[in-house]
Image (cartoon, grey):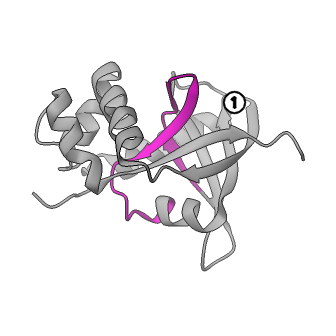
């Protein structure tokens, strides 16, 4: 199955970004903003940070999506939840075992996140084995606060 963005995503993303601009928290969903790799302009998209082994991560269900490619290029950005914006470093996880642990935890512990991985066509089903199968298709970034700014 070829990875694809579900049809509802553009409208859902627009709604989450609007609520965030208004300072309204949208559950665990944050808006990540990174500099566009070609435009140099800020680009934003909703993500759900997930904690595994005491560290925070964000998962791009489609590892070749624009936001994932921008995050790779920029290596930093901001996470906004409600009225709180945090500058962060974004480090792509390349260790396959860690990546699998994060994706499996994200999918099994986060009902919406797990469903999204299946709807995007990267996980065949909502099981730990299904989420492990998604690992080659997704991008995972460790999120650390930028305390030096």
Residue drawn at 37 percent across, 29 percent down:
106
Residue 11, how many percent across, how many down? 39, 47
Q: Using the rendered view, name the quadrant where residue 131 is placed.
A: top left
Taking the magenta stretch, the answer to whether it contains residue 99 is no
Q: Which of 36 and 75 is in front in this view?
A: 75
* Residue 50 shown left or right of residue 55 in the figure: left
Residue bearing mark 1: 23
Residue projecting furthest to the bottom: 38
* Residue 129 shown left or right of residue 33 in the figure: left
Residue 122, how many percent across, how many down? 21, 49
Whether residue 21 is visible here, answered yes or no, is: no
* Residue 75 shown left or right of residue 45 in the figure: right
Taking the magenta stretch, the answer to whether it contains residue 63 is yes
Q: Nearer the viewer, residue 59 or 46?
A: 59
Span colored in magenta:
44-67
Residue 147, how many percent across, how many down? 85, 39
Q: How crowded is mark 1: few (under 14 residues within 10 Å), some or many (20 or more)?
A: some
Q: Is residue 65 above or below residue 61?
A: below
Whether residue 129 is visible here, answered yes or no, is: yes
Residue drawn at 45 percent across, 53 percent down:
94
Q: Nearer the viewer, residue 93 or 35?
A: 93
Per the image, label 1 sits on a secondary structure element best described as loop
Residue projecting furthest to the right: 149
Q: Is residue 100 above or below residue 44?
A: above
Q: In this view, does 65 lie above or below 130?
A: below
Quarter placement of the N terminus:
bottom left
Residue 37, how many percent across, how many down? 60, 74
Residue drawn at 50 percent across, 59 percent down:
67
Residue drawn at 59 percent across, 51 percent down:
91
């Amino acid at each position: 199955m070829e990875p694809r963005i579900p049809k509802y995503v553009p409208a859902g993303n627009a709604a989450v970004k609007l609520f965030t601009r208004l300072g309204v928290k949208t559950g665990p969903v944050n808006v990540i903003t990174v500099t566009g790799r070609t435009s140099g302009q800020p680009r934003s998209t909703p993500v759900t940070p997930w904690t595994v082994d005491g560290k925070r991560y964000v998962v791009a269900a489609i590892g070749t999506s624009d936001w994932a490619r921008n995050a790779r290029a920029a290596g930093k950005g901001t996470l906004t939840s409600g009225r709180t914006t945090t500058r962060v470093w974004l480090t792509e996880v390349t260790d396959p075992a860690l990546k699998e642990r994060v994706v499996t935890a994200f999918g099994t512990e986060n009902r919406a996140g797990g469903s999204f991985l299946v709807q995007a066509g990267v996980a065949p089903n909502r099981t730990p084995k299904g989420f492990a199968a998604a690992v080659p298709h997704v991008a995972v970034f460790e999120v650390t606060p930028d305390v030096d700014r």
